[in-house]
Image (cartoon, helix red, strand yellow):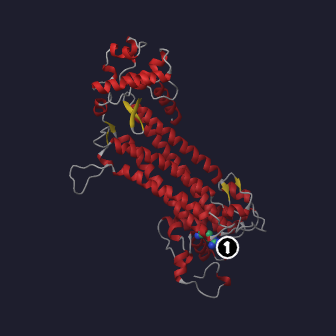
């Protein structure tokens, strides 16, 4: 089969060069969007009179047949045909002859591949948005289930103040909501049509770029052919959005890996999402969580990979850009795989309430509540802080908790303390005392839960 561009060549391509330059091994997944783009292009060509209605019909249905064959696994990929675009066009031409030869009128593979990528990424953004929604829903369901459970909150991984377990779950909903918003924002720039920018300069033919943009559901055609045929900003933005999703997933995974340890013992993971050891019979390992954490490397690496690829590329299209797909597909596949499993892990886990409660009074989780109690009694904040610090030291010397101190012990350090101090001592009381907007106390968390239930409904 002679190559579509072979007109000015007298020597055959070295097979190693064909191997070196091919992209069909990784861009075949663009078949569906490539056909979509080509069908819109053909319809536009017919509208402006560059194809007859009959030619357009032949092309559109010929492309549909080819796509169906590809999706049934019937297409044989050939290295010498380089990429998905050439496979589809040359198959069409083999079947339709001169009519097939007209499809590429007024476009180039440069605007074609940019269009394909945008259609592909747009679809992936919509799919990821659905996956993120499902994950948020899993956290909201957990928040409903765990409303009465109090957990230690940590800073520096040291026990700090108590919060409702549901506050943790809704914290993840917030993070994933920002991820969804970031994807939606990225989608706006994805959704601008490159088609018709042609090789780099546009065309002298009467093509209608508004029409192809409309047919493909793009918001508008891009205004500068040089810019848009070389633009891959949207891939970097997409990869970055995926990386933050991965960062959030890895924080969650890490937290749950810790909570699943014997040392913490906060969490029971379902057997279906843990694996055993080949040598230690007692082991149950949180491999799914570890790999969600681990796959972050592949996802995040896509950002520097793309930036390095783009850095200092002269305008407009350069073959370097072919490498963009490897980074983006890998990041996208891995993020989707993590997001696909995560909701089931979230739903299947159980908090080990007895273990959590047995140690809930450890670590002076009520110290800040006591300090704020003193502030309410008129003690300046710094003084209150110092006073409670002294009381904690006293407890440590007596191996007891703040709630175990007698009123006399307490009043010896600060005479503003009265019998009502009991209402803020103890972890549950300290949690209940948290009432500011956005805090982890039960009252506010219930409000936030209701807001999330409404938002996701
Ligand atoms: N396979 C190529 C890519 O992914 C398609 C564009 C090729 N354009 C060209 N002028 N050789 O970038």
Residue reaching furthest bottom?
10
Q: Can the viewer see residue 140?
A: no
Say which of 238 and 32 sits in front.
238
In depth, the one of 315 and 140 nearer the eye is 315
Q: Quadrant of the N terminus?
A: bottom right
Total label count?
1
- Provide residue 366's location: percent of width, then percent of height: 39, 25
What x and y, as percent, mark residue 114? Answer: 63, 62
Left or right of 210? Residue 256 is left
- Label 1: state its secondary structure: helix
Residue 95 place in picture, x, y as percent: 59, 75
Residue 286: x %, y % from top left: 33, 49
Q: How many other residues sit within 10 Å of disc 1, few (<14), some (14-19) or many (≥20)?
A: some
Point 37% across, 20% down: residue = 425
Q: Which residue is mark 1?
A: 99
Residue 104 visible from this viewpoint? yes
Q: Is residue 365 left or right of residue 126?
A: left
Residue sitting at 40 percent across and 26 percent down?
Answer: 389
Vertical arrangement, residue 232 with respect to residue 450, above or below: below
Task: Ligand 1: give its quadrant.
Answer: bottom right
Q: Residue furthest left?
A: 281
Q: Is residue 147 left or right of residue 92?
A: left
Q: Quadrant of residue 427?
A: top left
């Amino acid at each position: 089969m002679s190559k579509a561009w072979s007109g000015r060549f007298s020597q055959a391509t070295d097979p190693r060069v064909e191997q070196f330059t091919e992209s069909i091994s990784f861009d075949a997944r663009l078949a569906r969007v490539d056909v979509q783009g080509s069908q819109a292009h053909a319809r536009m060509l017919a509208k402006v009179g560059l194809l007859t209605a009959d030619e357009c019909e032949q092309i559109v249905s010929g492309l549909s047949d080819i796509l169906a064959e590809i999706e049934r696994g019937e297409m044989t990929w050939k290295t010498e045909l380089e990429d998905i675009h050439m496979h589809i066009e040359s198959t069409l031409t083999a079947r339709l002859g001169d009519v097939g030869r007209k499809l590429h009128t007024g476009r180039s593979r440069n605007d074609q591949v940019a269009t394909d990528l945008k259609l592909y990424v747009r679809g992936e953004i919509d799919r990821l948005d659905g996956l993120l929604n499902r994950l948020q829903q899993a956290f909201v369901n957990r928040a409903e289930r765990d409303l009465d459970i109090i957990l230690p909150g940590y800073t520096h991984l040291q026990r700090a103040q108590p919060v409702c377990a549901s506050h943790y779950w809704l914290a993840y909903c917030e993070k994933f909501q920002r991820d969804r918003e970031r994807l939606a924002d990225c989608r706006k720039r994805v959704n601008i049509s490159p088609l018709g920018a042609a090789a780099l300069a546009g065309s002298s033919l009467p093509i209608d770029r508004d029409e192809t943009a409309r047919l493909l559901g793009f918001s508008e055609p891009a205004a500068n052919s040089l810019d848009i045929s070389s633009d891959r900003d949207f891939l970097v933005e997409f990869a970055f959005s995926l990386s933050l999703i991965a960062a959030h997933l890895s924080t969650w995974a890490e937290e749950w890996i810790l909570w699943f340890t014997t040392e913490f013992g906060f969490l029971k993971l379902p057997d279906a999402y843990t694996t055993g050891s080949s040598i230690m019979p007692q082991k149950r390992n949180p491999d799914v969580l570890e790999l969600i954490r681990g796959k972050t490397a592949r996802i995040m690496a896509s950002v520097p990979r793309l930036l390095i690829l783009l850095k200092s590329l002269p305008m407009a299209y350069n073959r370097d850009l072919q490498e963009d797909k490897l980074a983006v597909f890998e990041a996208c596949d891995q993020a989707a795989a993590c997001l696909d499993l995560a909701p089931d892990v979230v739903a299947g886990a159980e908090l080990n309430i007895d273990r959590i409660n047995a140690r809930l009074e450890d670590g002076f989780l009520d110290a800040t509540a006591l300090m704020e109690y003193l502030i309410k009694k008129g003690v300046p904040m710094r003084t209150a802080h110092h006073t409670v610090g002294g009381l904690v030291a006293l407890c440590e010397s007596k191996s007891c908790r703040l709630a175990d101190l007698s009123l006399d012990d307490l009043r010896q350090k600060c005479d503003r303390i009265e019998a009502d101090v009991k209402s803020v001592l103890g972890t549950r009381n300290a949690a209940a005392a948290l009432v500011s907007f956005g805090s982890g106390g039960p009252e506010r968390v219930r409000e936030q839960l209701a807001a999330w239930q409404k938002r996701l409904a």
